[in-house]
Structures are given as C-alpha cells and as structure tokens.
Image (tube, rainbow, N blue to C red):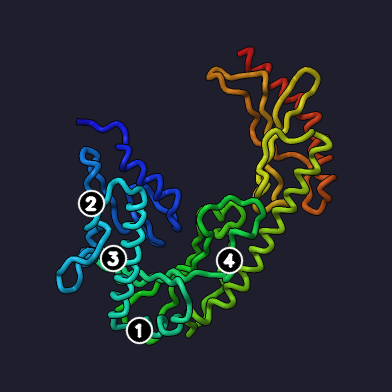
Amino acid sequence: MAIDTVPPLIAAQLNYLISHCPFSVKKSSLEREYDVAGDVIYNAMYPLAAPDIIFGPEDESFQPVYGSNGKSRKSSLADWNSKDPARLLSLIIELRDAYIAYQRRRIEEVDDDRLKFEISTMLSREGIEMYMTSGADKPEEVKFAVPLLDMELNKLVAGSTWRHPQKIYLQVVFPVGKKQSTPPPPRLKLVSSAELKAIFSIEDFRLPPWLDGMCTAEYLPTLEEMLEAQIKDAVLSVETRRKFITALVPLFGRPIEADPVFCRRATFLASSGVFTFLVHLSLSLQFPKQQPGLSLQSSQHFNSNGMPVKSPNLAEYPWSPRWEPSEMADRIFDFLTEECLNFKKYCNQLNQQ
C-alpha cells in the first residue's frame, strides 16, 4: 500500500523538531558537524510506533540504548509517546549528546602523544566536538570542530531573522597512528552555519599559516583576531550597500522588492515612454569592489514559454568603488536611459520571430 502523505502524528513531530531544534537538522536524519550520524525511520503504516534509528557501519559500536553492561538505559524510545509532538526532538538531542560523548571516549583511548597533547591544551574551550574516522578504505583520522569567536553573531545585523544560533568552527584534522619525527601540519578548514553566508563568506577568508611545532591552542588567537576584524567589516558593508540602494530611490522611486536586512538585492519599476520594465540589482559581499549585477525585465513582452523577457547580465556600465553612492546611482541611471532603448528593441524583435 502506497503512502502519499505523512501521517498527522509523524508530521506534528517533524514540524516541532524543525521549529524548535537548537541546531540544524535534515528530515529523517541526525546531522552533526561533519556528516550524517544516522537515520530516523518511521513506519508510516504504524504511526503510533517509535521510529527505528539506524547508524552507519563505522558506528557499529555506538549503542546509545544499552550501557556497557548490556542493560537498557532510560531512553525516549523506551517510553515513546507518539501523541507528544516534542518527543522526536527529545530523542534527537538525547542521541546527539550520546554520540558526542561516544566519539570523545573513542578518541581519548587512542595511543597518540600528539593527539593527547592537543586535547590537553584545549580542555578550557567549551563546545569542542570530536570525531574519529577509521576503516579499511580510509586512513584513521581525528577531526576537531572548534567553535570560534565569543560574540553573538545573531545580533550583528539589525532585523536578521536567523532562527538558529549562527556559528563558525575551525575544523582541524589530525592523522593518527603514524610515528613521524616531524608531524605534518593538520588539515584546516573553516565551516559556518549556512545562513551566515548572507553576510560573510568563509570561502573568501584566507586562513593564517600553520607554523612548524605549532598546536591548535597557539593557532587560534591569531585566527580569531583576523576573523573578528573581517566580520566587523562585513557588518559595515551592509550599511554601505544600504546607502547605495537608498541613493537609487530619488532616480527610480522606491524599490518594489528589496532585501531590507542584508541589502543584497533590489528591484525597481522603470519606464521609457510607454515601455515599462523592471531593473534588477544584486549586490555581492564584495560590493563596492565588485560592481552590482544588473539586468532588465520587460513587463510587456513574453517569450514562447509565457515567461517575461529578460536581458543578459549588464556589466559594461561605468563603475568605480571610489565613487560616492549618489554618483554610482547617477551613472547607472544615465547608462539605463540609453540601454533600455536597446532592450526594448531586443524585446520587439524577439516577439516578431
């Protein structure tokens, strides 16, 4: 029998989980900092039953429901109440906490002097997560996720509607089990909450070099100092983008659509005689060093699929990041005064084909 819709009891638990979970989750899975730890699988034919929890083969020894003596622990699964919408959330948090503790125990048992030293130097930091990979087809490694910056990122931009706490982590990956006179530097990667990319791109951030003989505790202060400075600049750039969009208003009128929080986009309604069209502007995080993306969309012409005719991205217009916002706006307006005639001609020719 095919199930086309999610049963109401299960849907209520999923919706509650997504709305109230303090960390990001994917439907039907437990998500940790590095990868998916396990799947939460419901039987849609029996919505009153507790879900099954399935972990990957690399986590075969993870037994969150049973203690070391083989006896069952007190668990949300043992006292499952399908009518309680918060029960799935309680289960996810319980399993996630158990998994973090399980990984930490595994790593503390590894006979590796460098690893033991790294852990000892970071004990004072809160929120560090650890994860060990092992298997026949991959080398044994230990990954640390180190939370960075003692600042509330959610409050940096006025009006932001981020539901989850925004975080930035340094991912540090050490090989283990290899005895070398000069240990190689760890692999380093900066990771962040997905929503934070609306204001700051970690891909554009250049990590400072890892010096010979350095440990993670020595590396972090310089990294955090650089990161904090660039994030503050990113917050200031929001206001720079806002001033530019505001400078367009006397020329184009108020935007009919805009991003009022991060000021990454705006759309204006414009006209030339009886020809009306939309002006779309997109502003990158590198604005004003990088000029805005600019395109036009007719409100009177449609293609064969019934979609409004749009121009390609327009990049050949005067621009300098050193100009004042008012001059930037004036130059774009002057450019579009001529370009809209070319766009109108393009639209008419397209409709005649």
- Element marked by disc 3: strand
Amino acid type of the residue that numbered disc 4 sits on in the rendered structure: Arg
**Residue 299 figure quarter:** top right
Q: Residues within 10 Å of mark 4 (few under 14, many from 20)?
A: few
Residue farthest toward the top in the current orientation of the protein: 352
Tell me how far mark 2 sits from mark 4, CA to CA. Answer: 43 Å
- Element marked by disc 2: strand
Residue 328 placed where, x, y %?
80, 45
The mark nearer the N terminus, 2 or 3, is 2
Which residue is at a point 24% across and 49% down the rendered structure image? Answer: 51
Quarter of the picture containing the N terminus is: top left
What mark, if any, has residue 138 been given in the picture? 3
Asked if marks 1 and 2 touch (Cβ < 8 Å), the reply is no
Name the residue carrying label 2: 52
Q: In this picture, is 287 found above or below 343?
A: below
Amino acid type of the residue that numbered disc 2 sits on in the rendered structure: Asp
Name the residue carrying label 1: 180
Residue 119 placed where, x, y %?
40, 81
The mark nearer the N terminus, 4 or 3, is 3
The mark nearer the N terminus, 3 or 1, is 3
Q: Nearer the viewer, residue 84 or 122?
A: 84
Name the residue carrying label 4: 206
Tell me how far mark 1 sits from mark 4, CA to CA. Answer: 28 Å
Tell me how far mark 1 sits from mark 2, CA to CA. Answer: 44 Å
Q: Is residue 280 visible?
A: no
- Element marked by disc 1: loop
Tell me how far mark 4 sits from mark 3, CA to CA. Answer: 28 Å
Q: What is the count of numbered marks? A: 4
